[in-house]
RNA sequence: GCCCCCAUCGUCUAGCGGUCUAGGACGCGGCCCUUUCAAGGCCGAAACACGGGUUCGAGUCCCGUUGGGGGCACCA
């Protein structure tokens, strides 16, 4: 069965990593079954709308490399409260069968139409208590130690006419009944109607609440599986009821557990990196982030114990059955490890390309057109030494900028100054003669040199390393020398030799 | 306060009544490899929250306790 799923963020800020995980599950499910995954913007709260956030959300998915089968197009984005259009947006007609529009504020007529349908069929009623009146009623209930549940008979005015300002509330029927939610992850959960209030479906401003909009849209847009955070669990029975009232088939419900911070609390601002862009800027690559997030609450099971997955493997192997029901804590150490693993899986030229902005940000003068070829040669030298793209700069800077002449103590290290000098002089002579100036011959020559001058490899190579890179920790020496080239290498060796003389 | 969810190593998890002296991964410690640093290989420490049931037999099923999380808006 093909699944059609959606991610439905509200444009109220950055795309949080917890939301991304939910989106990834939904996306994987859809792609696993050969179905569609789309994005719908839930901008029904005029007050919480944050300009630019829709664009940022879409850009996040673009960076993650998650392709959409539906989502707001240029025209739709331009028509939002603030112009949210951007070059990477879907073009009109790229919907692949999912009916739009994908912005809820552009679907208002649908919500009104279906709210009125509920009214006509006795599943809803009009009310017009003011926020102040409701707050007072709520307070009174609390004073009596009760939870405030709004019910039809509690209305202050029973003769609300259609032409005066009002809201539309749903009836919870039957009043003393129960509603059972069948959840693919949690099993069946029974809710007592006595604990469910007559939810407002259509607000005074003509906008729907989430509860109406999500049901109408998911049905109209053919969503087969509703995946969302488990903070929606308590209001799920209202949605089940609405599907029943409308006579629509229930989707598969799947409430995925929350992602918690290191302190066990729901992920929030003070847990460090939050938005997708922060992870991007900290040097994580999408392949690793997706792998990591998928593993947070999902496992292959069946005795298979794989941890590293490519995007295609995830799509091939993902299933809702593998999603656990307990909340997971975000573990940065594991993310770092996975990021290193995925960096090592990258092709050299791919890694080189991705490194460019990070090196530039570290003030290393990189000119993509000129330097990517060189970076591609450097890539295999540093690949297994970096966990994040930000780790590269201190490892490669000396390839692109001249180094200060290392002080004598640094050059000599644990050696006598005289021995260090001897080592440099011998290396100078040796490397002048090596032909061709490539890694294998260089290594061969320098190893032979150790025997010739009676030094241990670790001794000789340490001195040369400092002379050539200015560092005690650097990429593998022979590869480094080869990339640096004969001229630069000899020049740095000569300067170091002079320093020790 | 009321409602709901969750509970295996520090963390992510496998386990779907016996094959569990509980497996894997990250992290941690040790050893090996080695030109530094990594990567890699090997070894090790590390968990079924507690109490009752059910059963010949419970990490696995049921109930309770405790602990954690979420929700109780004309917010999503």
Image: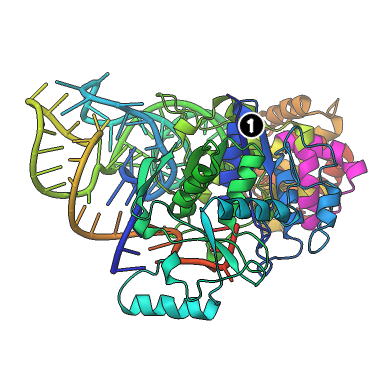
Local crowd size for mark 1, using a 10 Å CA cut-off: few (<14), some (14–19), many (≥20): some
Q: Is residue A260 left or right of residue A221?
A: left
Range of magenta residues: A351-380
From what the image shows, is residue A273 above or below residue A477?
below
Instruction: Verify whether residue A363 appears in magenta.
Output: yes
Q: Which of the two residues, A293 or A88, is positioned nearer the viewer here?
A: A88
Residue reaching furthest to the right: A369
Q: Name the residue that disc number 1 marks.
A: A311
Position of the N terminus of chain A, as image quadrant, is: top right
From what the image shows, is residue A484 above or below residue A345?
below
Label 1, secondary structure: give it: helix
Locate residue B12, reporting x and y percent.
44, 43
- For the point 35% across and 48% down, the residue is A178
Subunit bearing disc 1: A
Q: Which of the two residues, A90 or A414, is positioned nearer the viewer here?
A: A90
| Whether residue A417 is visible | no
Q: Is residue A67 left or right of residue A238?
A: right
Q: Is residue A338 left or right of residue A374?
A: left
From what the image shows, is residue A225 above or below residue A306?
below
Count of numbered badges drawn on the protein: 1
Q: Quadrant of residue A445?
A: top right
| Whether residue A33 is visible | yes
Locate residue A192, reporting x and y percent.
34, 53
- For the point 39% across and 69% down, the residue is A148
Instruction: Verify whether residue A183 appears in magenta.
Output: no
Position of the C terminus of chain A, as image quadrant, is: bottom right
Locate residue B20, reporting x and y percent.
22, 26
Q: Which of the two residues, A24 or A34, is positioned nearer the viewer here?
A: A34
- For the point 63% across and 59% down, the residue is A208
Q: Label the magenta part by its dominant secondary structure.
A: helix
């Amino acid at each position: 069965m093909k699944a059609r799923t959606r991610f439905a963020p509200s444009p109220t800020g950055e795309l949080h990593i917890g939301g991304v995980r939910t989106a990834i599950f939904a996306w994987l499910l859809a792609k696993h079954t050969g179905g569609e995954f789309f994005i719908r913007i839930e901008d029904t709260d005029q007050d919480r709308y944050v300009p630019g956030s829709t664009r940022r959300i879409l850009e996040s998915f673009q960076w993650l490399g998650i392709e959409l089968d539906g989502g707001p197009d240029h025209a739709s984005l331009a028509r939002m409260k603030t112009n949210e259009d951007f070059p990477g947006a879907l073009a009109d007609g790229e919907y692949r069968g999912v009916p739009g529009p994908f912005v809820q504020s552009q679907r208002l007529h649908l919500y009104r139409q279906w709210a009125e349908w509920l009214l006509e069929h006795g599943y809803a009623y009009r009310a017009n208590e003011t926020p102040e009146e409701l707050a007072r009623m709520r307070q009174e209930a609390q004073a009596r130690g009760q939870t405030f549940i709004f019910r039809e008979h509690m209305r202050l005015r029973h003769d609300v006419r259609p032409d005066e300002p009002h809201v539309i509330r749903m009836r919870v029927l039957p009043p003393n009944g129960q509603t059972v939610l069948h959840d693919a992850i949690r099993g069946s959960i029974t809710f007592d109607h006595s604990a469910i209030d007559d939810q407002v479906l259509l607000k005074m401003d003509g906008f729907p609440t989430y509860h109406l909009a999500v049901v109408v849209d998911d049905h109209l847009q053919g969503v087969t599986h509703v995946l969302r955070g488990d903070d929606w669990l308590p209001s799920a029975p209202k949605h089940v009821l609405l599907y029943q009232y409308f006579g629509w088939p229930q989707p598969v419900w799947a409430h995925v557990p929350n992602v918690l911070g290191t302190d066990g609390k729901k992920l929030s601002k003070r847990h460090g990196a939050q938005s997708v862009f922060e992870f991007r800027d900290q040097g994580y690559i999408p392949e690793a982030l997706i792998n990591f997030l998928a593993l947070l609450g999902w496992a292959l099971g069946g005795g298979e114990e794989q941890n590293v997955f490519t995007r295609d493997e995830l799509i091939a192997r993902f299933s809702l059955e593998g999603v656990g029901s307990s909340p997971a804590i975000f573990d940065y150490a594991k993310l770092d490890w996975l990021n290193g693993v995925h960096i090592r899986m990258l092709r050299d030229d791919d890694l080189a390309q991705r490194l460019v902005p990070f090196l530039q940000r570290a003030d290393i003068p990189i000119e993509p057109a000129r330097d990517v070829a060189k970076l591609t040669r450097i890539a295999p030298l540093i690949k297994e030494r970096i966990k994040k793209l930000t780790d590269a700069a201190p490892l490669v800077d000396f390839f692109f900028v001249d180094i200060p002449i290392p002080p004598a103590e640094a050059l000599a290290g644990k050696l006598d100054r005289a021995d260090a000098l001897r080592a440099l002089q011998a290396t100078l002579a040796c490397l002048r003669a090596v032909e061709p100036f490539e890694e294998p011959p260089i290594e061969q020559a320098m190893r032979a040199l150790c025997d010739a001058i009676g030094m241990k490899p670790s001794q000789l190579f340490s001195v040369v390393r400092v002379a050539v890179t200015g560092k005690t920790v650097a990429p593998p020496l022979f590869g480094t020398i080869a990339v640096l080239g004969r001229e630069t290498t000899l020049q740095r060796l000569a300067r170091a030799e002079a320093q020790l003389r």
